Amino acid sequence: MRVHDINGNRRPRRSRRRLSGKRRVLFDLPRMSVNAADPNMQAAIREALYGISRGHGGPFGTVIVKDGRIVGRGHNKVLVNNDPTAHGEISAIRNACGRLDTKDLSGCELYTTGEPCPMCLYACLWANIDRVYYGCTIDDNSAIGFRDAHFDQLGGGREALEDYLVQIDREACLELFRIYSETEHDLY
Ligand SMILES: [Zn+2]
């Protein structure tokens, strides 16, 4: 059956597919309230909430900021993409590099809801990101079932990077984790 809009025109194929396709929304996004003090961390939390509301992956959202402006966004898409490297930080780095048409994110700062795993931490270093702000800690990530601590210990810890990693808004990010823990989700 053809689908027409209010003016009698056929809807583009993409719209029709979206109407009839599988749509898995686990909770109603606007009803969720998580309030971070930092607006960039708040944007990262919104990104994470969007992802977990659709079952994309863990409660990890990221934004990248340059000169006070968000230039990249991403959230964990490990489950929806069947991609173990599709962490929020990696997704945001790819998004920012595409939008800025560069492979060098010098002058950028990254905000992420969970302390970066070793893969993402080193991706930030490879991308020349100036500083990383994170909410929940590696141990918080472990507490909700993720293997960050195990991989971090394999790498010998991160004491040498103490000044590079700055923790903020842990309470708001813990609230995000609480919401995630209460939703239907698969662990990986
Ligand atoms: Zn990661």
Image (spheres, rainbow, N blue to C red):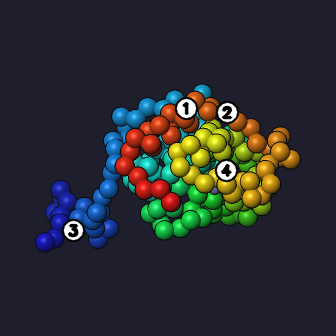
Whether label 2 lies within 8 Å of ligand 1 gets the answer: no
The residue under label 4 is 149
Q: Is residue 14 left or right of residue 135?
A: left
Q: Is residue 1 above or below residue 79?
A: below
Q: Are marks 3 and 4 in contact (CB under 8 Å)?
A: no
* Residue at disc 3, secondary structure: loop
Q: Position of residue 1 (x, y in %)?
A: 13, 72
**Disc nearest the viewer among 2 and 3:** 2
Label 4 sits on what residue type?
Ala
| Furthest-left residue in this view | 1
* Residue at disc 2, secondary structure: loop
Q: How far, Cα to Cα, is label 3 from label 1?
A: 45 Å
* Towards the viewer: 134 or 147: 147
Label 2 sits on what residue type?
Ile
Query: Which dot marks residue 10?
Result: 3
Query: Which dot marks residue 172?
Result: 1
Q: Is residue 150 left or right of residue 43?
A: right
Q: Are marks 1 and 2 in contact (CB under 8 Å)?
A: no
Q: Is residue 49 above or below residue 57?
A: above
Residue at 47% x, 56% y is 187
* Towards the viewer: 89 or 185: 185
The quarter holding residue 44 reads: top right
Q: Residues within 10 Å of mark 1 (few under 14, many from 20)?
A: many
